[in-house]
Each structure stands twice: as C-alpha cells, then as structure tokens.
Image (tube, rainbow, N blue to C red):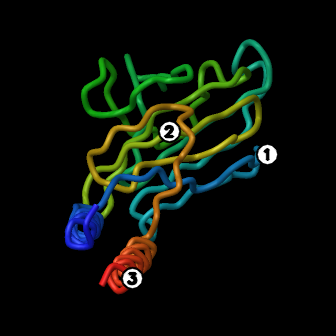
Amino acid sequence: MSARGLAFTLGLAVSLMGGGAAQAAAIVVTQLAPLTNVPFPVVLGNGAATYTFTAATAAETGNGPGAALATSGTALATSIFGSITDFGLGATIDGNGLYSFSAFPSRTVIPNSPADDFVGLAFTLPDGLHYGYAEVFGPSLVRFVYESAPGASIVTGATPAAVPEPSTFALLGVGLVGVAAVRRRKAA
C-alpha cells in the first residue's frame, strides 16, 4: 500500500473510532454479596432507584433458602400477575417482553431463588430508562448488572465486556499516525 493510501486508511480508521455514538456497556454494580435479614440496598442515581435484597427462609420459598426483593423510587422488577417474574440464563430483558415491570414496595420473595435465578430490572435515571438484571443463588446476590445506555436491552448472565475509553482510541490514533509518518519518510 502506498504511503498516501496508508495515511487515508489510518485517517478513516481514526475518524470512525472517534466519531461514533457511545456504545452501551453492561455495568456491574455489585458481585457476590451474602444476604441476611439485614437489608442489602443497591442504590442507583443518587437514590433515584433502590433495590433492597434480603435473605428468604426455606419456609418462604417452599424449597430452600433464597432471596427477597423490595423496590423504591423508580426501581421496578419484572412481574406477571403481581408477583416477581424470574428468568433463566440467556433471557433478554427489555420493554418488548411478555412480562411487565412493577414496583414491589414491600419485601417480596423471589420464587426460584434457592437455585441460580435472574430477575429483570427497569429503572429511570436522569438520562432515561435503563434495563438490567439481578442474579441470585440461595441467600446470595451473585451480581447486579445494568446497561449504561438508556433503552438498551440486556441478556441475563451476559458477561460484561470491557469497553475502551475514548482516550484509548485517541492514543491508538496518534500511534497509527506516527507509524504512517515513519513509513512515509522511509519511502521518500
């Protein structure tokens, strides 16, 4: 490739990296928190939405120790027929599901929480409506994850990918321009 072609290609790559809209990225709020009778709150947006988790007894779940959830502020959880709706691995949480989102102002047992289980979440922050999930396993909050971009769907159990910061792209661009300049000098 000629120096001019390389410079054009590098310039195009740098402009594409820096000129796009922000990508959605899954944000992990907490991981592996043992639950007890003492409330474990997950507070989002300076108190705009709060999810409060506690342990649930085997008598409450009907099949072993599990978890319970209460919501406040704009915090909602997936529901069907007024109870918390839970999901397995790989379910998509967004506004297009057959479930709805409801507030649960009082402590409500998560139905299948003695086993690895996921609850879909929706909450409003100043930038819009976000979707997420809470993974519970017995009396433990395994992780609480939500999408950074408003309206972006999330898949239960998806491993959040690291998203490079804009400064990383800028540094890459500067390095590529430097490589192009060195190649150009050598070709001359």
Q: Which of marks 3 and 2 is nearer the N terminus?
A: 2
Q: Which amino acid does label 2 sit on?
A: Tyr
Q: What residue type is labelled 3?
A: Lys
- Front tag of 1 and 3: 3
Residue placed under numbered mark 2 in the picture: 133
Please, what secondary structure does the residue beneath circle 3 have?
A: helix
Q: Name the residue under label 1.
A: 34
Q: Do the residues labelled 3 and 2 touch (CB within 8 Å)?
A: no
Between disc 3 and disc 2, the foreground one is: 3
Q: Is mark 2 on a helix, strand or loop?
A: strand
In this rendering, is residue 99 above or below 133? above
Q: How far apart are marks 3 and 2 (CA)?
A: 54 Å
Rendering coords of residue 167 (x, y %)? 42, 78
Question: How many residues crowd mark 2 within 10 Å: few (<14), some (14–19), many (20+)?
Answer: many
The one nearer the camera, 91 or 184, is 184
Q: In this view, does 126 lie above or below 105?
A: below
Please state which amino acid type lies under the numbered disc 1. Pro
